[in-house]
Image: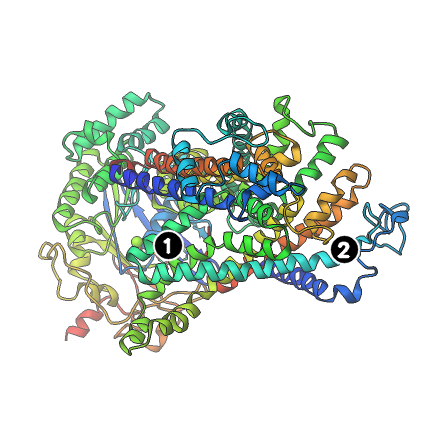
Amino acid sequence: MLRFLLRRAVLALLVCLTVLVISFALTRLSGDLAISIAGPNATEQDIATVRKNYGLDRPLPTQFVDWAVHAAEGDLGRSYLYHAPVAGLIKERMPITLTLGLTGLVIALVVAIPLGVIAAMREGSLLDRAIGLLALFGQAMPSFWLSLVLIIWLGLNLQLLPISGVDTWQGYIMPGIVLAFSAIPALMRLTRAGMIDALSSDYIRTARAKGLSSTKIVLKHALRNAAMPVVSVAAVQLGFMLGGSIVIEAVFALHGVGYLAWESISKNDFPVVQAVVLILAIIYIGLTLLADAMNAVLDPRLRAA
Amino acid sequence: MSPVLEAGNLRVTFGTSVAAVRGVSLTMNRGETHCLVGESGCGKSVTALAIMGLLSRTAHRSADILRFHDYDLTRLSERGMARLRGDRIAMIFQEPMTSLNPAYTVGSQMAEVFQRHRRVSRATALDRAAELLQRVGITAPGLRLKQYPHQLSGGLRQRVMISMALMCEPELLIADEPTTALDVTVQAQILRLLQNLQRELGLSLLLITHDLGIVARMADRVSVMYAGEIVESAPAGALFAAPTHPYTRGLLRCIPVPRQVRRDEPLGSIPGVVPRIAPDFVGCSFRDRCAQAMPDCARHVPRQRATIDHDYLCRLPTDWTRAEAA
Amino acid sequence: MKHAATSLGALIVFAVLLAAVVAPLVAPHDPFVQDLNQRLVPPEWMDGGSAVHPFGTDQLGRDYLSRLLYGARISMMIGIFTVVTSGLIGITLGVFGGYFGGKIDEVVMFIITCRLSIPLILVALTVVALIGSSLLVVILTLGLLLWERFAVVSRTTTMQVRNLDYIAAAQAAGASRRHILLREVLPNILTPLVVVATLEMALAILLEAALSFLGLGVPPPLPSWGLMIAEGKDYMFFSPWVIMIPGIALFVLVLGINLLGDGLRDLLGAARPT
Ligand SMILES: Nc1ncnc2c1ncn2[C@@H]1O[C@H](COP(=O)(O)OP(=O)(O)O)[C@@H](O)[C@H]1O
Ligand code: SF4
Ligand SMILES: [Mg+2]
């Protein structure tokens, strides 16, 4: 187990390095970054000034090493737009994105696990099919459109929830629901498959032979085993949600990291863009490692090995 | 004395095309070991699961009589049945490697059944579990209780299953091929264990096996199953001395006397396989493989008595074997 | 019921494909022509609607039905060409990893891991922002990003196929590697890949709509459904149809593709790719 985790950690480090290269290369895609920054009405003179000020006149490898070394020290450069350190900007906005992501994950789990359990217990029934169809509906729902529909319906018609911003905790509910939609189908199917597997297993037959109540059989004996893959996928889904929250933050005007990234992309603030790409990738990698570790805790067979 | 278990005309079908158990009747008395033998696929496990009320949802069970002491199991609710299971009727399965939950410790799984039926504290239940582990010959029970199933060998797991089944001192223990998955030395230990426990606790044991050595050693009474029916049932001595049904004779070929059988002797082999039987099947299901088959065997077959407690399901007269020998 | 769902999916996909092909013939108006006197006309079935604009008009007075029909072209093009691009990349990587194994496979797995850790939408937005928004750029960007499921599935299935007898026979008969990969391996792993293709097509269509909605996808005045929703957003409180019509179109198309994929999975007996 320890060897396995160590191997994964080394791999994770290599992936981080690769992402570092990619996020740097990404912003150099257009060829001359200075032209983009200086804007459409800039003169030759302006562009040259920009190039000098931002260090873009140096050779690319020098620029990369400079950015990588600073990034490793936690210095992610300065925002052209805010004239402030990027690390500070991201740190300031990360809590909103994390809260949103976790809200989405909790909603997704609260919906997906019971649905998956019920579908598995009634495998092949009309209810099972209805739940399967529901998952397909969720999968087909464009998140930004769902956001707008919820804003009209819950925010405007019923006036139940605030339509933008997060001045109160209620502000997280609507975006949380939308974010959850993207994760529910996968989590639900996984729970269902795991439960079907578990429910037909020999140890469930043993539990029944012991005369345990059906609640205990389903929740204690079957779900515990079905939950292991769900946990790791949930961690990965949280990673996808944090990446995908850019759309939802834009719609609901939540000033989190996603919003910051969107703004920076639209306004050519590339130090911010490459930093956000890097940070989100690192969070994702961390989450996959966390999933491995959690599985090791949950599954006694892995723990001992 | 009233029987512990009585089944009359027990039937189990899967869907509309498979009849796995077709009118099984059997009676178990207190302290008796009843062996159910037959080739793989003949319906032994389904019979056991039907008695336990553990059939899958796709199965349909019916019976004229299915009684455990004073409980009419055909009418008992799932809750009522769950109260009996693990407490007064227990079962050991064929697959020790997969029958324990991998996510919980041995102690937790053993204590659970005692706590469920006896409403005692976990500590008391764990003490009881340790006691039983010791009883089935496990040293250092304290350590075993803290271990997970994957840390135990197959033999140990089956011992755990046995002691778990005994937690509440059941009156009826159904053991479905409890030693098939284990190697020979472990098999012998487990059987000796079952024999001792049965003697000490006076429990009734329904022992399912396809190993004639086990039958010869353990059985008070033997029922031979074929294609979902009991084709012959008799006290062990009588069955080995005077097997009457052609199928039983095929199984016992070359093994006329009990106690001379080698323990790991498999069932005698008869050409052909157990047919899959549809619910509307009429006649003797063995006729395709039977050397004595005659045209009438395609019609209804009567159950005949060789002696007062020895019956068989065949058209042949009881003394046909003498005619054959002549 | 399962059968009905699959047929419904196929019907939806076929209908949208047909709409995309014949849009110029059946559209009642030019989708780009503005009529500032006819702004935000409601659809025919609502108060104030008329048969002239069956689905109403947008904030610039452009006919909504015509825009919707032309929008189908964009969605279908995105869906099909993205899947072709990403399929080529993913299947190549997966087959190589699965067939050769060892170091090559480790490299393939590493590339897949890297791709998964990159935030998809963010990178797509950045690329489009830097290179400039056009249909071609969106297709290529999404194609370059959405290949990992193709790679994962083709890798596992290739591994299974690799050890089968007929591959060994082909090797023994001295067939070239190229021949084995293209003629022996590929045809035998196509079944599950068809299902992946439907999933990716649905995802690509949704992502294009999201990018266009955020203003960094297909450029205006092209009638991408995502863009139509973005442009209608400011008017949605008083004229909700401007976002409902393209939104429902998008939802129904993606649902249709998924229903079709689900049905194909059952028909072809492939396992659900996760
Ligand atoms: N869940 C099931 N669905 C359909 N058929 C079954 C099921 N369980 C058992 N059977 C059939 O019932 C017959 C008896 O099986 P079983 O009781 O397991 O035999 P054995 O005597 O080996 O224990 C077999 O033909 C088997 O195919
Ligand atoms: S009834 Fe006929 S076929 Fe069946 S066992 Fe007896 S003799 Fe053989
Ligand atoms: Mg069996």
Q: Residues within 10 Å of mark 2 (few under 14, many from 20)?
A: many
Q: Secondary structure at mark 1?
A: helix
Tell me residue C174's x, y (percent): 29, 77
Lateral position of residue C38 relative to residue C103, left or right = right
Residue plotted at (42% across, 33% down)? A216
Q: Quadrant of the N terminus of chain A?
A: top left
The answer to whether residue A63 is left or right of residue C85 is: left
On whether ligand 1 comes within 8 Å of the CB at mark 1, the answer is: no
The kind of residue on which mark 2 rests is Arg
Q: Amino acid at mark 1?
A: Val
Which of the pair B217/C91 is nearer the observer? C91
Residue B269 figure quarter = bottom left
Q: Where is residue A206? Give x, y as percent.
A: 34, 41
Q: Position of residue B118 (x, y in %)?
A: 34, 25
Q: CA distance from mark 2 to mark 1?
A: 42 Å
**Residue under mark 2: which chain is it in?**
C
Q: Earlier in the sequence, mark 2 or mark 1?
A: 2
Residue drawn at the location 46% of the way across and 38% of the way down: A278
Q: Quadrant of residue A11?
A: top left
Please give the residue where the numbered disc 1 appears in the rendered image. C108
Q: Residue C2, relative to residue A209: is it above or below? A: below
Residue indicated by mark 2? C67
